[in-house]
Image (cartoon, grey):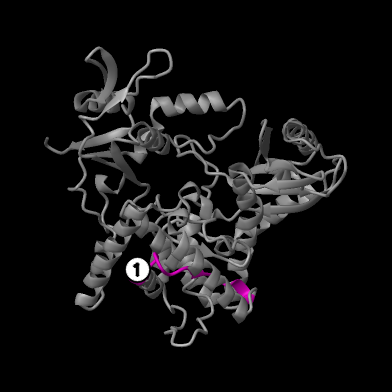
Amino acid sequence: MTLRRLRRMGNPRQILGRLCRLRSFPEVFDGLARTFRSLTLPLPITRVTLLPPCLSDLPTPRPRPCDSPVTSLKVHIAFERSGKWPDSLPALMKLKPAFYLAIMKQLSHKPKSEVQHFRAFSDHLLVAKDGFVFRVTAVPPNEVALRQRTVVLPGGVIHRYPTASSKAYHRETVLIPRIASALERSVTENKAAIQTEAAGLSLVDHWLSSQFLSPPFSPPLFSLLYASLFLRPSHKEGAVNHPPPGSPPAAFFRFLHLLQATDFHQTPIILNFNDELTEDGVLDLEAALLTKMTSGRTSLPPIVLATPWDTSGDVWSRSGAGGPSKMMLNRAQAVSRAAVRSLAAVPPSTKRTLALFRADLSPYDLVLHVGLTTLCSSAMRELQRQHISQFPFLVDVDPAEELFDFLKATLVDVAMVLRRSRATFTGKSSSSESYVIAIMWRPDAFTRRFPYNSKTSTLRPGFILEELDGKWSTRLSRDAILTWIQTFGKGLIQHTAVKEK
């Protein structure tokens, strides 16, 4: 399997450094950054940062009629520290739209060669430039602190405690750009390593998706697990070190081995980018994580992963951050173990490698094949017509993904809902390569009853209302949920496969 062929296989998620393969992209983003820095605003812009595309698919060029919606690239603009910033979060949230309007007003005076389209919204600014769409967000220097919970201790000492909001915001605005920069610097000295890492990551991404494992393995998590294969070997006594993979298939197979052979329950993953930590520092961090895993394992996610800038071990792998549950980790290890055994049984070949990207759908009770070609239905054209007054492209609108999210939220306590988000390397074109949603009912899915209060409860789609012993309750109905799915997904779902009762 050649590198050229790997590059043609879909739109891989890649970290920032891999975008150098797109010739026009560096110039486009650099030009956008120069345009922003040239603006005259109440507070000068100090930094323009692109969030790594490992958080989303690579952007598609300017869409033609009936093309899929465009995926935007996230850009953060940071401003200098100043006493002019509000000291309360509500006031800061009200100030941000003013910055977007001020930026849009100044962009209107720029020539079309710099920016083609732009539109300000309450929480972001959309800018289209040379075929790419950027979602620009202002990042005030004090927003992380304002999102934290403030407690006044005796003596007037003010202490700030992290909240879920401040952790998520710090992760997106501070940690992800820092990790992206470290990932880029770790391989930029070797062009062959860049190509190997990018193509291998594409294989990992497609394999996880084909096996209905992405989610729960989020792009940042599997990108970091994959990056551990390319970092400097361990200096621990007795450790077995291997050189970095020399080809994309080797990197992919090494990832499979890492996933199936690692005892994540007792082994923390530490990524020491660019030797930010000394050897003693790595050992101390490992000892601290092992102590936490021994004394309070239930408070940690199934995968404990740390970097020099986030040493808690749960920033990237907890459930709220896109990490797998213990059950899904066990499933991922079982699938990767079967793949490794299959490859070890006979000499590797392209045909056998492609077989790894096919998943058995027979265990699932309900399988929905969402046709990507049907996204150009009359409903999508109407949606595009409604958006044209705000922005000439349909940006970040994915009906298939919205259907998956809705089903997952609706059936959260009665079924396991998974999805395969893109075509896989099957070597042929068929309906099986479409976006697939797979549902597996829990044993008590159709018998479990949920209390119902007409004043506070809402009847979920697919559930029926019943009275038992004078009390009202709801229960999932097989016929009702199938009818609702067929009605709600009309024009979007190509084929529905239902297992016999």
Residue 252: x percent and y percent?
A: 38, 69
Residue 344 in sight from this viewpoint: yes
Residue 329 lies left or right of residue 88; in this view the side is: left
Q: Nearer the viewer, residue 383 or 169?
A: 169
The residue most toward the front is 154
Residue stretch in magenta? 259-275
Q: Which residue is mark 1?
A: 256
**Residue type indicated by callout 1:** Leu
Q: Nearer the viewer, residue 2 or 264?
A: 264
| Residue 378 counted in the magenta span | no
- 434 sits to left or right of 20: left
Name the residue located 53 percent from the left edge and 73 percent from the top edge.
Answer: 287
Q: Secondary structure at mark 1?
A: helix
Residue 315 picture quarter = bottom right
Q: Is residue 477 above or below residue 304?
A: above
Residue 323: x and y, percent? 44, 53
Q: Nearer the viewer, residue 188 or 336?
A: 336
Q: Quadrant of the C terminus?
A: top left
